[in-house]
Image (spheres, rainbow, N blue to C red):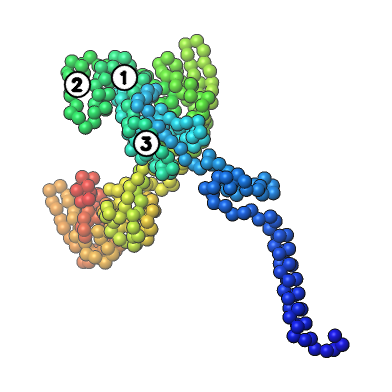
Amino acid sequence: MNNRRLTKRKQAQLFVLLTALAWATQTLLHQWGYGQEVPSVPLSDAAALAAMPDVPGGEKFVPGDANSTPTGTLEMRQDASVYGADITLKQVCRWSDEDAPAFTPIADLTLVHLAAGVSFRTISVDDVRQTLHGAGVNIAMINFSGVTSCGVTRSDALAGESQTSVQQWIDAQQPNAAKPAVSAQLAQNASEIDPNFHTLHDLLVADLAQRLSILPEDLQLSFSPEDEKVISLAEPCFKFDIRPSRARALGNVSWDVKVLTDSSSKKITINAVARAWEQQVAVAKPLSIHKLLSPSDFTSHRVLVDSLSDHQLLGLDQCVGQQAATELRPGVIMTSQLVDAVPLVRAGQLVTVNLTRGTVQLRAVARAMEQGALGQTIKVRNENTRDLLDVTITGPQEARLGEPAPADEVSQAN
């Protein structure tokens, strides 16, 4: 411009040109960095989803159909026949082929374990809901249809007890009605289940329950489909030699089983996935350290777990009356590490010490050197002789010299 100043018109033109250049550069960089943009459409508009262009690479970031939603319908059967003591979900409920991917993984979930001598049981929809909820299934996504209860018959019961079983079935079908008593003649003619009758399934459950110190009815074993026929074999027609190869914890377990008959034998390997039902006591509200625990501080629920806790789980009666060993948040599962016994004697307090020798009873006062709870042994000091003594606490600021207090006295103090 020959060193001449720009006019206002030239300045405006130059500003517009720079603005257009900056916009074009920004648009080009955006397209290079992110590629083609997928138009935003409502998920409920099926036509728009079908017409939406594919993202390069064949990926779509929204469900293409309704089958991807984890939901389904369970239909309760009116009656069912089971073999063995365990009643599973697939025996009480059925579902369509479209819902099979959602329910097949939990088809072998045990709903009820029948007690010995019980051949009939009514399973209600609430029983199914409660068990599924405890197993971690979102029951809000499941639709229930059919009848409200299912009458289950145990088919492996002996024919000799059929009369008693009929009466049990009638009682089970009419839980709120007056149940007529079984006559003495009926009870006399009914025979008990053969005590020597045990399926391989029952023997495997009992073996694992003994090794893990769990009640058999609290175990949930899922076997592979190819082993279903084998585990239904029963004594005394067959004999079994069971040797666990991996059965020391929950999870994947296996046994080496030799099936014996009068003329031959066969060795097979049985694999299963083991889980267990636990009655857990959880904290319901924040609790401070050393707080005296009461029933309103906890909630109790039955949960299906894949592994056992390293610490001993506590029941509600074992928590109430104790004190919190640390600060507890809602949802924490109560174990033996989280509670302390309430001290009946504290360090520095005067303690009444009782000594019994035959019919002679002596009583003295000593000062506690440490704190202790019921049944614990602590050291106290005789204020006159300055001797240190080991005493067993029997009550608030009371102790016994010599042998610990008898078990009945400790239970009465509790």
Q: Residue 145 falls in which quadrant of the image? A: top left
Q: Is residue 150 above or below residue 11?
A: above
Q: Amino acid at mark 3?
A: Val
In the image: residue 92, left or right of residue 261? left
Residue tagged by mark 1?
193
Q: Is residue 364 above or below residue 333?
A: below
Comparing 404 with 100, the one in front is 100
For mark 3, give the secondary structure.
helix
Which percent across, then down, holds residue 209?
41, 33
Looking at this view, name the residue that lies furthest to the bottom.
4
Which percent across, then down, holds residue 311?
41, 48
Say which residue appears at 44% left-offset and 16% top-offset. Answer: 238
Q: Nearer the viewer, mark 2 or mark 3?
A: 3
Mark positioned earlier in the residue sequence (2 or 3): 3
Looking at this view, name the residue that lies furthest to the left.
359
| Mark 1 and mark 3: Cα distance apart in space | 28 Å
Q: Residue 84 falls in which quadrant of the image? A: top left
Which percent across, then down, holds residue 82?
38, 24
For mark 1, give the secondary structure.
loop
Q: Is residue 114 visible?
A: no
Q: Amino acid at mark 2?
A: Val
Say which residue appears at 45% left-offset and 31% top-offset. Answer: 95
Say which residue appears at 73% left-offset and 63% top-offset. Answer: 28
Which percent across, then down, holds residue 125?
34, 35
Say which residue appears at 28% left-offset and 59% top-offset. Answer: 292
Residue tagged by mark 2?
182
Q: On residue 128, which mark appears?
A: 3
Q: Nearer the viewer, mark 1 or mark 3?
A: 3
Label 2 CA crowd tier, 10 Å (few <14, some 14–19, many 20+): few
Comparing 114 with 133, the one in front is 133
Q: Is residue 64 visible?
A: yes
Q: Amino acid at mark 1?
A: Ile
